[in-house]
Amino acid sequence: MPRYGVATTKDNLSKLIDKALAGEEVIITRHGKPMVRLSTVQPSRIDRGTMMEWLRERRESRPAIAITGLELKRLDQEESGH
């Protein structure tokens, strides 16, 4: 298994990332000792239903305001003098 020193890694990081993405084990050493292993990360998949439930709960937990977006914009313009 190839190992790469910190200086080599700095100069070739993009290539080493490509190697890791291709499935090759990439070990980075410091003073000849293995310190870091580059590997791919599996993206987490969020369940749509869970996400929608979280959004609904968040929306419902916030207090309602008795002003429309248009009214809010007008107030902001009045305060800023525009």
Image (spheres, rainbow, N blue to C red):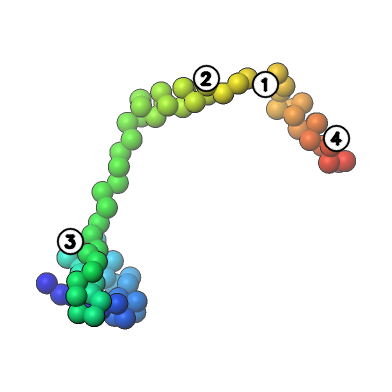
Residue at the disc numbered 2:
60
Q: Does the CB distance between marks 2 and 1 fall below 8 Å? A: no
Q: Does the CB distance between marks 3 and 1 fall below 8 Å? A: no
Q: Residue at x 29, y 72 (%)?
A: 15
Give the side of residue 79 with respect to residue 65, left or right. right
SS of the residue under disc 1: loop
| Whether residue 18 is visible | no
- In front: label 2 or label 3: 2
Q: Residue at x 70, y 27 (%)?
A: 69
Q: Gap between marks 3 and 1, in whole Å?
A: 53 Å
Residue at the disc numbered 4:
78
Q: Earlier in the sequence, mark 3 or mark 1?
A: 3
Residue at the disc numbered 1:
65
Q: Residues within 10 Å of mark 2 (few under 14, many from 20)?
A: few
Q: Earlier in the sequence, mark 4 or mark 3?
A: 3
- In front: label 3 or label 1: 1
- In front: label 4 or label 3: 4
Q: Does the CB distance between marks 2 and 3 fall below 8 Å? A: no
Looking at the picture, does residue 16 appear above or below residue 62?
A: below
SS of the residue under disc 2: helix
Can you say which quadrant of the picture contains the C terminus? top right
Q: Amino acid at mark 2?
A: Glu
Q: Amino acid at mark 3?
A: Gly
Name the residue at the right extreme. 81
Q: Amino acid at mark 1?
A: Ile
Foreground of the two, 51 or 64: 64
Residue at the disc numbered 3:
23
Q: Gap between marks 4 and 1, in whole Å?
A: 19 Å
Q: Earlier in the sequence, mark 2 or mark 1?
A: 2
Looking at the picture, does residue 25 appear above or below residue 3?
A: above
SS of the residue under disc 4: helix
